[in-house]
Image (tube, rainbow, N blue to C red):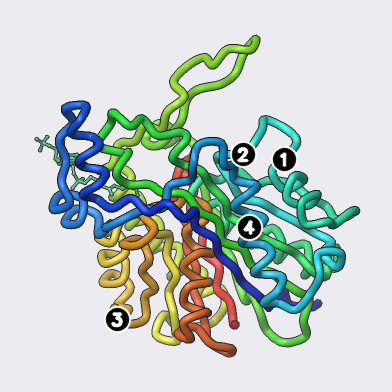
């Protein structure tokens, strides 16, 4: 049975950078009080990239995908599987993956979206790994892409300061060499209401609430507990110990969650990739963006053992352990 190996990665962030100070000044015009000090202290976020009005997830995804394909040295025509993880799709349908496929110039590959919010990338990566290991695909493109700014209530300081837009992508290929070693996905739908966008389109009208709502403290506690257990479990299944991990690439929501997790798992800070300060929480894009940043700056190298983790709405979480 072949392994699925990550052979390329890419990332794209919309050019407009909004610092905490700029955001605080903007919120102040609507009598909403926040500050760089609060945001930095509670979350570690210093800035986020925000897409211009009208820019869609597929547009960000295509740019990240092109970079990943170039890095992998394969052409779009060679892909036989395209999965986009997103909670901010361009349309109800067709899937964002089909839109990306058309823009990349591929015809015939299976293309579909995965909806697991901030766990979306690890869900999509695990799905692609399963296709490749079963012999149902040879070259897969897995993308996390979001325009979360479009579902934020910019009058809710408890959420609007936390998120940003972007896309990250990887190319996976069938390989005899070890690649993805183990993966584990979980969900607990009874916790749906701690992080949700409970709106829908019915008869041409948005019904319910179209904005992201979150019980931040509940999500925080759940995230740390779930991710610690998932990390241990995936390592046990793969027969490796947590000390063997060269790099952890956790979901980038809050540096305090990342630090708690690192301490719980006894991983030193210099083994943990952090981009939340630069990107804020880009939901499904956060893990592939962080992975790509660390591959490009030379920290994550060929042969390294990498643990990727996602957690978010659903409630969903999961881990992928990969030999690079
Ligand atoms: O992908 C998964 C998605 N989400 C997450 O992972 C988020 C997980 N949760 C968190 O990161 C944290 O819970 C938050 C960053 C959301 C909040 O941090 P916290 O330390 O849990 O703060 P809190 O909700 O307990 O709020 C503390 C205070 C409150 O004021 P009072 O009631 O103490 O007077 C809030 O109203 O901070 C206030 N507050 C703010 N103040 C300034 C909330 N948001 C802001 C803000 N600026 N932006």
Assign a secondary structure to mark 2: loop
Residue at (44, 21) in percent of width and height? 209
Mark found first going from the N terminus, 3 or 1: 1
Q: Quadrant of the C terminus?
A: bottom right
Residue toward you, 272 or 292: 292
Residue toward you, 180 or 29: 29
Residue 5 in the image: x percent, y percent? 69, 77
Residue 170 in the image: x percent, y percent? 64, 67
Q: Is mark 1 within 8 Å of ligand 1?
A: no
Query: Where residue 268 is drawn, which disc sits there?
Result: 3
Please determine whether, in this image, residue 278 is positioned above or below residue 306. Answer: above
Assign a secondary structure to mark 3: loop
The answer to whether the residues at label 2 and label 1 have Cβ atoms under 8 Å apart is yes
Mark found first going from the N terminus, 2 or 3: 2
Please determine whether, in this image, residue 160 is positioned above or below residue 277. Answer: above
Q: Give the residue pinned by disc 4.
A: 143
Q: Give the residue pinned by disc 2.
A: 89
Please determine whether, in this image, residue 55 is positioned above or below residue 93. Answer: below
Residue at (59, 45) in percent of width and height? 57
Q: Quadrant of the N terminus?
A: bottom right
The mark closer to the camera, 3 or 4, is 4
The mark closer to the camera, 2 or 3, is 2
| Distance (Cα) linking label 3 and label 1 | 40 Å
| Distance (Cα) linking label 4 and label 1 | 13 Å
Mark found first going from the N terminus, 2 or 4: 2
Assign a secondary structure to mark 1: loop
Residue 179 in the image: x percent, y percent? 66, 79
Report whether 2 appears left or right of 278: right
Assign a secondary structure to mark 4: strand
Quadrant in which ligand 1 is drawn: top left
């Amino acid at each position: 049975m072949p392994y699925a190996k990550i052979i390329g990665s890419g990332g794209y962030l919309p050019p407009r950078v909004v610092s905490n100070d700029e955001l605080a000044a903007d919120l102040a015009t609507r009598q909403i009080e926040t500050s760089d000090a609060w945001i930095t202290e509670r979350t570690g976020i210093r800035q986020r990239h925000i897409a211009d009005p009208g820019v869609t997830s597929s547009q960000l995804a295509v740019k990240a995908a092109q970079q990943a394909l170039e890095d992998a040295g394969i052409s779009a025509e060679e892909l036989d599987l395209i999965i986009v993880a997103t909670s901010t799709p361009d349309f109800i349908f067709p899937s964002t993956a089909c839109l990306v496929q058309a823009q990349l110039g591929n015809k015939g590959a299976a293309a579909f979206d995965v909806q697991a919010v901030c766990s979306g990338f690890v869900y999509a990566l695990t799905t692609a790994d399963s296709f490749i290991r079963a012999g149902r695909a040879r070259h897969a493109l897995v993308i996390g892409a979001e325009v979360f700014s479009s579902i934020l209530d910019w009058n809710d300081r408890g959420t609007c300061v936390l998120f940003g837009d972007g896309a990250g992508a990887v190319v996976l290929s069938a390989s005899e060499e070890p690649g993805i070693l183990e993966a584990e996905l979980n969900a607990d739908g009874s916790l749906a209401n701690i992080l949700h966008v409970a709106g829908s389109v019915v008869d041409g009208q948005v019904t319910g609430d179209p904005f992201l709502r979150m019980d931040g403290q509940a999500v925080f506690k759940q995230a740390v507990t779930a991710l610690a257990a998932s990390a241990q479990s995936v390592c046990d299944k793969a027969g490796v110990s947590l000390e063997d991990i060269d790099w952890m690439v956790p979901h980038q929501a809050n540096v305090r969650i990342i630090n708690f997790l690192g301490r719980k798992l006894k991983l030193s800070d210099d083994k943990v990739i952090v981009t939340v300060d630069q990107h804020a929480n880009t939901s499904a894009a956060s893990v592939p963006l962080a992975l790509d940043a660390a591959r490009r700056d030379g920290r994550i190298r060929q042969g390294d053992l990498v643990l990727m983790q996602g957690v978010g709405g659903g409630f969903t979480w999961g881990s992928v352990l990969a030999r690079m």
